[in-house]
Image: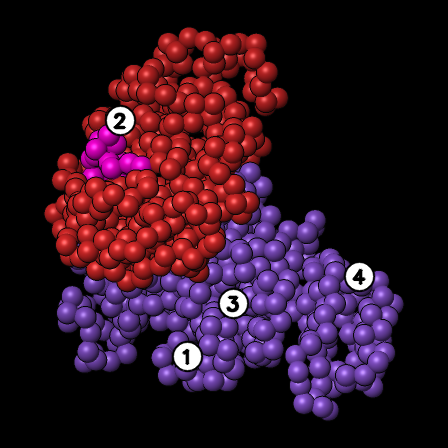
Chain colours: A purple, B red
Amino acid sequence: MSRVASVKIGLLGCGTVGGGVIRLIERHRAYLAAKVGAPLEIVRVLVRELDAPRVPECRREWLTTDPEQVLSEELDVVVEVLGGEEPAGALLRRALARGASVVTANKLLLARQGPALLGEAVEAGVDLAFEASVGGGIPIVRTLREALTSDWVGSLHGILNGTCNYILTEMQRRRAGFEEMLAEAQALGYAEAEPSLDVDGHDAAQKLVVLSMLAFGAKVDAARVPTEGIRKIDQLDFHYADRFGYTIKHLAIGREHGEALSLRVHPALVAKSSVFANIDGVLNGVRVIGEALGPCLLVGRGAGEMPTAVSVVADIVDVARSRREGEPGLATRGIQLQERPLLPLEDVESRYYLRFDVEDRPGVLGGIANGLAAEGVSIEQMVQDGRARALEQPVSVLIITHVTREGAVQRALEAISRQPFLRGPARLLRIEDV
Amino acid sequence: MSRVASVKIGLLGCGTVGGGVIRLIERHRAYLAAKVGAPLEIVRVLVRELDAPRVPECRREWLTTDPEQVLSEELDVVVEVLGGEEPAGALLRRALARGASVVTANKLLLARQGPALLGEAVEAGVDLAFEASVGGGIPIVRTLREALTSDWVGSLHGILNGTCNYILTEMQRRRAGFEEMLAEAQALGYAEAEPSLDVDGHDAAQKLVVLSMLAFGAKVDAARVPTEGIRKIDQLDFHYADRFGYTIKHLAIGREHGEALSLRVHPALVAKSSVFANIDGVLNGVRVIGEALGPCLLVGRGAGEMPTAVSVVADIVDVARSRREGEPGLATRGIQLQERPLLPLEDVESRYYLRFDVEDRPGVLGGIANGLAAEGVSIEQMVQDGRARALEQPVSVLIITHVTREGAVQRALEAISRQPFLRGPARLLRIEDV
């Protein structure tokens, strides 16, 4: 490829993130040109409506509602901030086939088609960069791709969904219930009207799948990742977690486990003294443990127009630089994805917090302890809630187990659930040392 | 520059970090070759003694005790892990002049000669990369250089010295004194026999100067950075900090302040609920606030053979890649350093924790309050320590001020220090909202 006078950019989408990208490119024009070695030139911007209000830096002559108008240009970089699997995927595939490098912020698309798109980018000898797809303003993709280039990642823990983290943080701070805090998050714009993608953990699972490509070289279907959300967490869980020295966070976890890879998304107890316990509100955080590097934690805004736009522009600079140097493909180089077997959840080993809401009568503690012992689950702490309650109200029995295989705990819970003294389903939360 | 078959590397120094670099390069040979587009080939290694024990991956035929033997090779990358200002500086200058790109882990050298070395690298059209010089295994240099490329950094807070952080963490956990914990840190190898560089804050100041080149484009002499260590912190300070909801951390701080730049290194009170308060032991952490990105925090091992080696190898891959692509200089591109005026400490605005050890008699509180009021220092909280003490023992008066200019506080302390009821020098700790 010959040296180009300017790096020609097409934008697919011009919502809040797209507007932020345009604003940053225009504002930092001279500096970015120095970094790239050539000016960045926005050529075309795909929009839904020509006349919607936009940032003042966005020029009218760039706009088109026709994707063909964007893709028919001779572009160096196509930036996709449309969101959604299609038509984003089809458009990016065409851009790659035409020899453009691609920058995308689209986690859903990457979780569904990431390995295929990376393969097409490698084949076309161009870049596919996606820093903004996970953790908005946190440079986690860059860190996995570059800083850890001479290391093996043993495990990864992430607070990857800002909505869940906001709701859990506020439930803890204000001793409020899930529904109430969800409603507030919706009012503040931190949660969608249809919140399932966030609060049921699917968004975090998609992001975990994207990170697993880089951290573990793994090609994984997000639907195969054991995924639990936060709807069942209640004030009593926070109360008891606190008593044992923990708080509750919604985590996405990846861990090497011999041939297999353990991936899971669920709420978990996290020690209050840990840094993770204090990643609050809409912040996201990711901790990676490298074999040589040891622990590395990154915390920042997981979403938002400008943090995401900063990550998109950092990617644009990277791929523009490698095109200008006549050797694109840096962002994808060395990435070799493999199908990896996933460790079944019952084979995961962890400590567990168990809560049984039971009748307050003799024999109950013994019944629970025997049920656990029958499956070889060993108890580290067992507490019966001593708070004064109205008669006939159930009391809570709390148990912290030693490290155990999850299958054993699940079987014990099933057996105990058939006991007549149980007043509701037993609760299980994993305890993560993070 | 023509494409090369392999990327030829010379190593200056082969201590623990150098050994780690050799080990990682050999272990990840195939993957690194894929990332770079050519194999990395170690050609020469400068050592003090040929026969000292080394990692098994280090080949005897690489070793030489003569720097000329290294520099006379046609090298693509010279890696400096000698430490100390000279002869490291002179050797790197010659390497740059011969057209080699340079990777260094040497914070002292960078703090003293960083701008000059960067200038020589730019002139020679080669790279100078230095991720490992600050925060060992934390990718902070890369984050400032690349992730924040389209943003302005407003402020930077760092826990940059693992020795100080270990000592303060253990003083807090175990209610121990500074001298005792210093002795322990020395026994564990976390502190030098001559600990001044660490515990008096000079090491952190050098690292702050290195980060300020990237974060603020500033050319600063570390000797001009107001620097305080942790020798004066005692158990009473931890006790009272805790009572107000704080812990004590040793911080390096940079902040844009109009035309000027505010740089300082000192212990400070940090809210216990903040993520920073939980960065414990030998961990380091850096928080940057970008105008668009918002807060971004990175935490990891600040030192240690392997974390540092991982950062060095990540730099080697970067500069090797850009050489192989025929356009070195990526790591230094766009860095434009300026002399910037530093904000005098007396013009810094902050909240303050003040401690007065005084005689327990009427009029003392009034005397202190009047002294502060005379300089316009407004009090947020004032507490006289109510713990039972032997008669004739001084009692402590604790004050948390509202935001005030430091000059006013210093003048008030000077006036109050002349009061007859004072039993020792007043203590001042800044409160940082981090």
Which circle marks residue A185 in the picture?
1
Q: Which residue is mark 3?
A: A204
Q: Are marks 3 and 4 in contact (CB under 8 Å)?
A: no
**Residues rendered magenta in the picture:** B207-228
Determine whether label 3 and label 2 are within 8 Å by CB. Answer: no
Front of the two marks 2 and 4:
4
Q: In the displayed image of the protein, which residue is found farthest to the left?
A: B259
Q: Residue at x 59, y 51 (%)?
A: A155
Spatial CA span between label 3 and label 1:
17 Å
Q: Amino acid at mark 3?
A: Ala
Q: Nearer the viewer, mark 3 or mark 2?
A: 2
* In the rendered image, the vertical position of residue A235 relative to residue B173, given as above or below: below
Q: In the depicted view, which residue is nearer to us: A76 or B290?
A: B290
Q: Tag 3, which secondary structure?
A: helix
Q: Earlier in the sequence, mark 3 or mark 1?
A: 1
Tell if the residue under mark 3 belongs to the same chain as the one under mark 4: yes
Label 4: chain? A
